[in-house]
Amino acid sequence: MKHRIQLTLNGDPKELFVEPHILLVDLIRRELGMTGTKKGCGTGDCGSCTVILEGRAVKSCLILAVEVDGSEILTIEGLRSGGKLHPLQEAFIQHGAIQCGFCSPGMMMSAKALLDLCPHPTEEQVKIAISGNLCRCTGYSKIIEAILAVAHKGKPLAASAEGSTPGRE
Amino acid sequence: MRGFEYLSPTQIPEVLNLLHTYGDQAKILAGGTDLLVQMQAHEVMPGYVIDLKRVRELQGLRPLPNGGLTIYPLTRIADLAAMDGLHPSFSILREAAQTVGSVQIRNRATIGGNICRAAPSADMVPALLVLNSQIKIMGAAQERWVPLADFFVSPGIAILQPHEILAEIHVPLPPDGGMGTYLKLGPRQTMDLATVGVAAFLRLDSDAAICRDVRIALASVAPKPIRAFEAEKILIGNPLSQSRISQAACQASLEASPITDVYGPDWYKRQMVEILAKRAILEAMKRTRGNNET
Amino acid sequence: MGEDERILGRRIPKLDSIYLATGEAQFLDDIQLPGMLYAKVLRSPHPHARVLRIDTKRAAQLPGVKAVITADDTTKVKFCHLPILPNKMALADERVRFVGEEVAAVAAIDEETAREALELIQVDYEPLPAVFDPEEAMKPGVPLLYEECPNNIASHFVRQFGDVEQGWREADQVFEDRFSCPPVVACTMEPHGCIASFDGAGKLSIWTTTQNPYNIQKALSGVLKMPMHQIRVLNTFVGGAFGNKSVILPLEPIAAFLSQKTQRPVKLVNARWEEFMATRTRYAMVIYLKTGIQKDGTITAREAKVITNNGAQNNKAPAITLLTCNRIGNLYRIPNSRTEAWVVYTNNQYGDALRGWGGPQAHFAVESQMDIMADALRMDPLELRLKNANQPGDTTAWGWKITSCGLTECLQEAAALSHWPSKRKEGGRRGIGIASVIHTGGGSMGTHGGGNFSEVSLKLNSDATVSVLTGDSEIGQGSDTIMAQMVAEELGVPLGNVKVTCRDTDVTPVSMGTWGSRVTFIGGNAARMAAAEARRQIFQVAAEMLEVAADDLVARNGKIFIKDSLNPVLTVGQVAYESIVKRGQTITSKATYSPPNTAPPDLKTGYGNYCPTYAFGAQVAEVEVDLETGKVKVIQVTAVHDVGRAINPLLLEGQVDGGVAMGVGYALLEKLEWKDGHTLNPSFCTYKIVNAPEMPVVQTRFIETIDPHGPFGAKGIGEPTTIPTAPAIANAIAHAVGVRIKDLPITPDKILQALREKEKK
């Protein structure tokens, strides 16, 4: 039996009719065509499916679509606004925090959720916030740099793009 | 994962009615961080999924007149992890909540789910056990209060019947203060189920010299979370010397019955019970003394 | 030239980052085609069994199921990447040899229906006795995986150079140790997958998460018995590969057979548990290492016996094991060496390339033993390494011709940056350890089942923007960006003018692909040559326009100058317009680079120089060990790598960070737990990889040795960054607590056990 659900996705109201077994991640990717959110494991371990639900970072592979009736959801596609990249997106790019990019949307969602709650986190708090987002390419260093750069607004804590030294501490 | 009906009641009687009707064909959905994994793996295939998240009476926490705490089962672990203004004796609950999974998991997982999953590794349970928590179980016909310690039977199995729900968790305020800590050991610092988890809670006398009461609970080293009663006996009523603490910690390790699995050999886990118990007791002692002084 | 105009040596973010940052980049599972079906694979639950009967009737009748196939519905062609005994089929016929082996497959209207259909397939198996440990599997009288293969030995070889007996005689001490390395998996965040689609004329288009589209095309041509021009491989954005997505899995042929049968596109993507159980592992190895050394630290001889767990089917084990052997024989100046290797069949899932090939295994053994020897000789491990370090201009006993070599500088710099001397003296629970790395910096000829060439073609538009076509894949490492930088620099146009386009075998040149840290060097050289040719064409036209000699012209940042003058006389755009639009002379070029200083190794002896350059490096790890729990915290890794020339330090740092993360996992966390052929930990919950809080601080430096053959002096880095990490950590642990663990991963229980045993003695 299909259930009628209403939600706001990236600021847009949506009304859908869904079967109970449809996962939120599949609703977002298939029915709503937003493939920026990824499916890496389906067991809530890798974090690639992270979206922001009612202001909190959650793993959309562990949520049924029917559970989010009445909710506000933000995905990576909603980060950009007015054609301008979000500071997190800019920072991820400039700091070299993106390699294969598969984990990046989920990573940025966790980062945004953190910064919305805690605008000036410590490095330790950033690590905890992304501890549920696995990355196999970057070793996390530049991801953490990028998030801290946004948190500390333009005062980079380490060399990013256009630095001059070919190495780094 | 197909072929189930989704139900979203808003009142407890409605929930109990549905459970009475559908019995063991139904599964309760709280945070979903366990149930959805099991359903996607086809380990569990209910005909009815009953989502409790719209039942207001099952949400939140409130202090009791006698200083204790009532925690409703749908309270999110993230909210427990961020609790402030708590009586210091309850800070162990916040500490335990902070060790559960990752931020995303904590944002969905509930304390009720953590208890009802009945996993030997449940992180909230040792902290609740050392605080002598009681739980209210409700069925359509009756309700009963049981000590949390009596709730668990074996891995994944609790005394909760298919027609019942866990409706309330009551955490009494320990008399005369006291402080605790929950220590968790896993392969990594975050994200992991406990390979070994130890909670210790103790009360000292007014001179902070004699141990008035101590409770030690262990996760992941038995078919269910357990108290280390024999270890506790070594400390109660005695001064907390280094050697006595070591003795108690050793005894705690003997009360554990860990198994060898992908997380490590049994002898290692047993040894870690001793190490964590010692550290937990020392930390609880430090906090209790620190709290007594304030 | 202003800072803004400089292209090489700049910290430039990957040029495709924006698509990845916004989520619009299409990975395999993001692609939806009209009428697409979803496939699932039925896998063997037995490690070894005869397949007596498969009944697919009920599955085929399930509403929504469009096809069910078994081996009989396929060509039954056996494949293997190396030209040795191919014994892998898309679907098993008559016998299964590992848990997870593909037995049947379903295509249905959605994944759930496909999964339900699998449960309706009835397979009757007759279990057979199985073997799991390679050393056991070699013994007489054990069950055989292949009757024609006595003692389950898939491959056996010896490589010897010099005279080890003489080496033992010259040695003052001989050390013998046994090391073991576990099976680990790639854990790419994106699972392996593909979409196969036959058109009405029988041409197959296949989208796949590959790092080597040409390999896929060639392999599928063999398996499907189709000519190559009827197979079009389209490379999607790849969510991590690390060497593990370079050859076909059964996934591609299975999807193709299903698409052929249904005449609809078929998507087949691994579930995460299949990534753990049914993709291919880093080969598990046991290495018996024997080294002779003199009192002053001079190594006289090295001998190794390597036993590789091949798993149930052939893929790359002989080549990877040979690499392990040649690293053992070539890291440091080893005048005499003998390596003997056995690649042994067992009823486990089989192996493949993974970052470093057999390098991590070899280095764990060699670099651990170096410290054991240093300890016995009372020498500083750094000094022992410096004493025996490879030097530029060396020709090794194996015939390797070392050109650029910064090993000494890397060791010294790593030691200086990490405050080695003072930290070596500190005691307590903290320790510091060092390890070197030698690896290819540009692929290898004739050792990987093929040549080592890349082809790049360029097309200039009339506005001087450039499309670059290459068959080498961008897999997140930034190879497209590096290539664009080199083209822009060589051609003299701004970086923003250059775009490396798609990988599509209908269009892009044949190339050996992304592996062996080769794209910077081989692909880069091809790109540079193609750009140089395009520039020659531009200058020819410009010279005519200006009535000067072409040799008198230079180009920079899109402008053309007479040599030694500061004012531009033309823009590249003006020349391109003149040539293409006015004169009808397109500006296109193509170059193939195959390194001139390499040849395949001698078939009999294995002697030769088959890598065009060698990448060197050194890493120092600092750890803290909790003596009560045995837990190790890696505090810092100092990584110094000889990269020839740092074309893009930002991307290089990314490779170091990622490589170190994998190395920490290999050292401390990762292992597929196999019991009687079953994988006990097929999930991220039970198989742990490094997450953010586990990552140490990484301190990075690059040494530029300006390789004589590398494009602008550069050489590869993708793999060297992960190879020395585990031994550096093992050495640091030994320094901290005085126990040596020779069996990866170094878990807390192993440390406590070793401490206990040390106390007993």
Image (cartoon, rainbow, N blue to C red):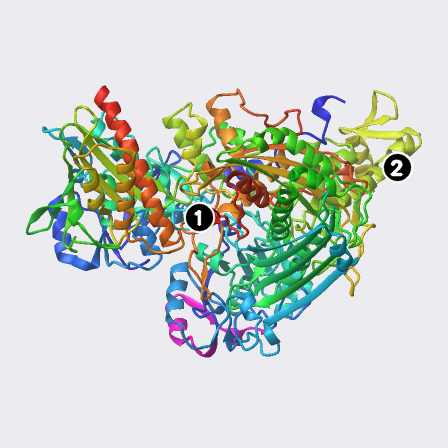
N-terminal label among 1 and 2: 2
Would you say residue C510 is visible in this rendering? yes
Q: Label 2: how many residues lie within 10 Å, few (<14), some (14-19) or many (20+)?
A: some
> What range of the chain is rendered magenta?
C50-76
Chain identifier of the residue bearing label 1 in the image: C
In the image, residue C477 sits, relative to residue C288, either above or below, namely: above
Residue under label 2, please give it. Answer: C540
- Position of residue C56 in the picture relative to residue A100 (left or right): left
Q: Position of residue C285 (x, y in %)?
A: 58, 58
Q: Is residue C58 magenta?
A: yes
Residue under label 1, please give it. Answer: C756
Residue nearer the viewer, C478 or C99: C99
- Position of residue B49 in the picture relative to residue C549 (left or right): left
Chain identifier of the residue bearing label 2 in the image: C
Quarter-of-image position of residue C339: bottom right
Residue nearer the viewer, C482 or C74: C482
Residue nearer the viewer, C752 or C123: C752
- Position of residue A20 in the picture relative to residue C206 (left or right): left
Name which residue type carries label 1. Arg
- Please tell me which residue is depicted at 20% across the width and 59% down the height of the picture: B25
Q: Position of residue A7 (x, y in %)?
A: 32, 39
Q: Is residue C132 magenta?
A: no
Q: Label 1: how many residues lie within 10 Å, few (<14), some (14-19) or many (20+)?
A: few
Q: CA distance from mark 1 to mark 2?
A: 77 Å
- Please tell me which residue is depicted at 47% across the width and 31% down the height of the picture: A80
Name which residue type carries label 2. Gln
Quarter-of-image position of residue B237: top left
